[in-house]
Amino acid sequence: MIVAKKFLDYIEKDGFHELITDGPIIRLYFLTDEIIRIRSSFDENFEESSYTLALTAWEDRLDDFLGDYRRKVQPIEPRFTNKDEYLLFETSELKVQIIKNPFNIRVLNNEKELLHADLVGRGFVKDHLNRLFHYSAYDEEKDHFYGFGERTGKLDKKNTRMRLSPKDAIGHDPEFGGPLYKHIPFYIKINEETKNGLGYFYHNSYDTVFDMGNEISGYYEPYTYYSSEGGDIDWFIVGGKDLKSIVENYTLLTGRQIMPPKQSLGFTISTMYYAELEKDCDKEILTVIDKHRELGIHVDNFKISSGYTSGLGTQKRYVFNWNTDKFPDPDGFFDKMNDKGIALIPNIKPGILLTHPLMDEFLEEDVFVKTPDGKDNYESPWWGGLGRYFDFTNPAARNTWKKYLKKQLIEKGTICVWNDNCEYDGVEDREAYFDYDGKGGRATFLRALQGNLMAHIGIEAVQEVYPNKRPYIINRAGFAGIQKYAQTWAGDNLTDWKTPKFNVETILGMGLSGVANTGCDIGGFAGNAPEAELLLRWIQNGIFQPRFCINSANSDNKVTEAWMYDQNNDHVKAAYQLRYRMIEYIYTQLFIANKTGAPILRPLFYEFPDDIICYTDENFTFMFGEAVLVANVFDKGAEKRRVYLPKGCKWYRLDKDMECFEGGSWIEFDVDLTSIPMFLRENGLFFFNNELTSIVKDTTSQLDLYIAGGMKNQKIYEDDGVTNAYKDNAYLETNIDVSPGEKRVINFTYQGDYESKLKEYIIHSIHPSKSAYWVSVNGDSLPRFLQHEKWEEAEAGWTFYGDEKAVLVKLPYMGKDMEVIISYEKFDLIGMTDGPDWSLD
């Protein structure tokens, strides 16, 4: 075992600072004031060769491949102090202290508060099996750990042990299962007392273990550790003044969420069954689309499973092959789906059966992963027999894959690619050989990267066919940074009552790991079909996920459909209508994720870091963007729901008459099958659009804005939802500021060149105790209507709506800066304030 115990020397070099220890050599790189790289190498090989990083301060062998996905910055120069006991590197935000003997690293903020401390005497370790370990001390009572990418179970991973090794984890236990499909070695430590946080990103794609206080040794204080099977301990410290800043910095380092086409936010039908019929699957799919719409269940996308690639007379999958019994005219099928306003999303898989009709060409192009000696093509079990695997670290393989992706799918009329089974779980020999862009490398660290590379190629293919359209890539597997390429989903989940509630925690963890655009299969993929109540509750929760999709391969031979239980169809329709009225809000949240990395579904402590209960509440609630707390019902037969509302503001029950609650309190309320509990934050902006039935064919003409208090810089985002013109200023960002008080002043300012399709705003100005005195727009008084019907008929005006305790203000959309004032001043209707005193003695 090799351990860094003694500091030996310090050398300043061009672009980094080098520490010599009796164990590894450690290099420090200061990318920004809040992002610091500490790379520890036991073999002293510091080659830069990353498929992952979006921000660097050094030359990298793969810079040309990453292209616009990477930005190189000039490293900052920290202030340096060399004392007898320690070295100190200081930026404006962080301090890295190197204790010389015994060697260990400490990280502090600019107020000298401790954020990280290596476990003294055991910080950087290489064991007898060549495994690498980084040990950290922690506060076993006050510290919490969040992130780690795609995980099951509770959001806080304190006292757990996790392995990251991508698996085809079909039917995994949602509470205790793992590993899953993604490999994202990033987490955030937060101290509930100091509220200080720090991000830990280990830039290493070898199989990984995180032990967050599960292991105990009497010889050491409480500790956590990171372990990998090889490579370097390439640790990025990700700082920030708060949790939001840490997530923003992490996504600066690994990439921001790609901006999707708006259509992707609509409902997606998917099940394996529709592509498994013996013939005429195309006709069945078109009929199913029509049935959804006839029943009032909105739909915009269809994910076509891999059955379309089966060989004639067999169920074997041959990617890029069309079964002409099932789909006699693929080009015509794409045309019909596009005419219906449905995006067809074809499934593709990187495994190639030995009997594939294109095998000779693939062999000629030399596209496959190799055996450990690099001479033969690696083979292992695949779907229906032995298979080989495309090696996406090989430029020839990438070009061949792209050629057929364009020819067999994209050129037929789609911008969508569904990358499935890209965990490379079947490459079981960790010494299998990959091209690694000419350098040569092993499966042990390259297989986890294949999903990202597969998505990268998909984007290139779409852009080469449709240069001005946004690609819609969906991935099941991926490494850190997958968000810059794709929407993701959490694989083949289990049909069980506990799955939808723990899927919430999985999505929250992904959001804190940089992946904002994600979701889980509604209704469950594996196991029997869900019972009626479970499916309804799953749908009512699924409408808040960016990826809104029912997908199944039920073991009882049933097809999970939104409309499969007549007794609940009215409730199902209501949920879908709610989803489609929130499209503009969700789209705005994706824009914010694209700009800042902020998740869409957020844990309560993300918005309320000063409320200690939010760190430990296990009530499966979440913030939907910044403005709304969602408290879905997850328990069978539930008649009550108990919810904690964070302190610091009032809360208004959006789904039930705007009942007002004080923050910092637990409440309990009745629920039934219609319940989708939503609470508006007093200082948050929420908005509904007019109901859409098709995102592609319908137009958002009205926005209902819900305002209950003062707020700053709340946004509404619009663009054409299809093209890349938004990158050239063809967008519209509406910023809304509200000044609270007796006069509620609402300012609208606009940025961007996109011509909005809006025709009117309706402002719902909520006040728990009174109506308004008067309302003005840009200094002009608006007429008041006592009868709601007259207000509805008017082009502009205001009225009081008792059911919501709100003043409703109707305004035509002007497209220019606007000031709305709603006066809640004290007034005297009949002029008696200054009259004689009629009270009796």
Image: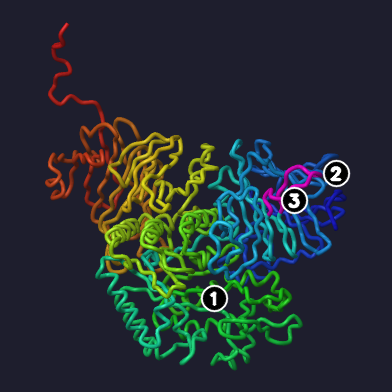
- According to the image, label 1 marks what residue? 457
- The secondary element bearing badge 2 is classed as loop
- In this rendering, position of residue 471 left or right of residue 378: left
Which numbered dot is residue 101?
Answer: 2
* N-term mark: 1 or 2: 2
Q: Quadrant of residue 693?
A: bottom left
- According to the image, label 3 marks what residue? 135
Which numbered dot is residue 54?
Answer: none
- Tell me where the magenta segment starts and ends, as one range: 211-225
Q: Quadrant of residue 289?
A: bottom left
- Residue 358, visible in the rendered structure: yes
Magenta region's main secondary structure?
Answer: loop
Alpha carbons under labels 3 and 1: distance apart: 37 Å
- The secondary element bearing badge 3 is classed as strand
The residue located at (71%, 87%) in the rendering is 376
* N-term mark: 2 or 3: 2
- In this rendering, position of residue 122 left or right of residue 453: right
- The three-letter code of the residue at mark 2 reads Asn
Label 1 crowding class (10 Å Cα cut-off): few <14, some 14-19, many 20+? Answer: some
| Magenta stretch: includes residue 223 | yes
User: Where in the figure is residue 138, as x and y percent of width and height?
Assistant: 69, 43
Q: In the rendered view of the protein, which quadrant contains the N terminus? A: bottom right
Residue closest to the eye, 451 or 576:
576
Mark 2 or 3: the one toward you: 3
Label 2 crowding class (10 Å Cα cut-off): few <14, some 14-19, many 20+? Answer: some
- The secondary element bearing badge 1 is classed as helix
Please give the count of numbered marks on the rendered protein.
3
Label 3 crowding class (10 Å Cα cut-off): few <14, some 14-19, many 20+? Answer: many
Alpha carbons under labels 2 and 3: distance apart: 17 Å
